Image (cartoon, rainbow, N blue to C red):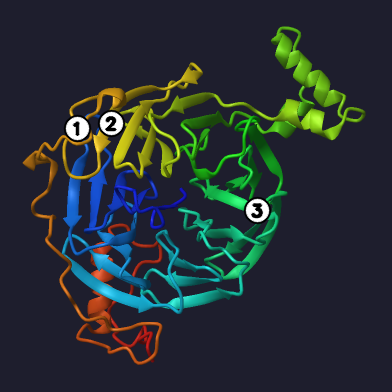
Amino acid sequence: MNVTNYRTDANNVVNFVNFNQDCTSLAVGTKTGYKLFSLNSVDTLEQIYENDTGDTCIIERLFSSSLVALVSLSAPRKLRVCHFKKGTEICYYSYSNTILAIKLNRARLVVCLEESLYIHNIRDMKVLHTIRDTPPNPTGLCTLSINSDNCYLAYPGSNTIGEVQIFDAFNLHAKTMIPAHDSPLAALSFNPSGTRIATASEKGTVIRVFSIVDSVKLYEFRRGVKRCVSISSLGFSTDSSFLCCSSNTETVHVFRLDEPKESMMHAPIDDNQSWMGYISKAVSLSATYLPTQVTDVFNQGRAFASVHLPFQGKKNVCAVTKIQGALRLLVASSDGYLYVYNLDTGESGDCTLVKQHRLDGYLEHVDSPISVNKDSKKPASPKSINNDQKSKGTTGISSYAGIVKGNSPGIMSESEKFQEIVAAVETPPKDGFKLDDDKEFPPVFS
């Protein structure tokens, strides 16, 4: 899923909000710290951790583990890797420029700067590879597959047209370049298996889905025709059957990925199909003599479902996931709210709002966003916070390493560092962690 960055908007309630890789939790960065919420219930939003050490502008959690990577506004070039349940800082790294995005899976952690990308091994946090002199990327647009077997990193290959550069972050080599759009890229998202990638351009009218293996365009969806918009996020459902798209407008679209367009275009016409379906087939078969613009419009899919948010012009991030056995569309916004909608897979149309939750630590008892009094202050129930995990701050363990030479090694030994990472990452990589030999992984600052 795509990270939504809120650091440039002074009117936002939160600095940053994003779902973790499997959409089981939500991380929120604020001017006073960060919060982690569990997403296992529709009716309640359980706050599992809170840190009030200040001005968090990026916070990413590794699946449901205790490992988090964060950046603060006061130190925008410094990445901190922490074990939040213990309240300890495992290590930190300093970079030559502002950190714009962090992406991580069970094998790699990627740090995105405006003109470079750093790929870390998540086992020991060593820098394995640096992609330098990338096209200017001031928004930090990039995405990392959550599947370690298809461990691909995608980022803009150009700042003038919509080229997607696919990099194998596990084997550390370029894989392919996909010419996705005529305009510069605005959003990217891998499906959970890492076999497909969804793209949107700055124009914001068309969403495309490509195969990673052969760069073939599988789907093309039209988000709208009346106006160009700024796409905030794209997100696949867990089974890759749905794709959601949010923007700076009040509408969130959900597209259904039934069958690739190539297969549909070459399928025989069914006499029992709908009249519009017949026309679409006829247009596809007539593509040899109709203008390209006409055939493109007929071949583009339309939204299966949509949501009309109670706001517009605010940055947000969307996701499709299962909660309590049903498919839900989630929208977390910079206005400080999480909106939960039902997504009926058997019937298209508008999704129904079932719950909304405040992200500022107070409970919201009103279901309808129209009647919400955002100035109301009702203390959160103690049950919504795990007091064993809640901390007033991260314990200051001196870091052993940093990218900038001359950093003090501090007090944490290599074995202690690896033990901390193993403890924080509940599901280690398939090849496991080797922790017996202190000399097996030399210090980064050597």
Which of the two residues, 388 or 362, is positioned nearer the viewer here? 362
CB under 8 Å between discs 2 and 3? no
Residue assigned mark 1: 364
**Other residues around mark 2 within 10 Å, as few (<14) / some (14–19) / many (≥20):** many
Label 2 and label 3: CA atoms lie apart by: 34 Å
Question: Would residue 19 be visible to someone looking at this image?
Answer: no
In the image, residue 269 above or below residue 226: above
| Disc 1 secondary structure class | loop
Label 1 and label 2: CA atoms lie apart by: 7 Å
CB under 8 Å between discs 3 and 1? no
Q: Amino acid at mark 2?
A: Gln
Report the side of 250 relative to 426 (left or right). Answer: right
**Quarter of the figure that contains the C terminus:** bottom left
The spot of residue 309 in percent (x, y) is: 41, 29
The spot of residue 19 in percent (x, y) is: 36, 47
**Other residues around mark 3 within 10 Å, as few (<14) / some (14–19) / many (≥20):** many
Which numbered disc flags the more N-terminal residue, 2 or 3?
Answer: 3
Residue assigned mark 2: 356
**Rendered image quadrant of residue 262:** top right
Q: Amino acid at mark 1?
A: Glu
Which of the two residues, 59 or 379, is positioned nearer the viewer here? 379
CB under 8 Å between discs 1 and 2? yes
Which numbered disc flags the more N-terminal residue, 3 or 1?
Answer: 3
| Disc 3 secondary structure class | loop
Which numbered disc flags the more N-terminal residue, 1 or 2?
Answer: 2
Residue at screen point 41% across, 57% down: 8
Which of the two residues, 131 or 147, is positioned nearer the viewer here? 131
Q: Amino acid at mark 3?
A: Pro
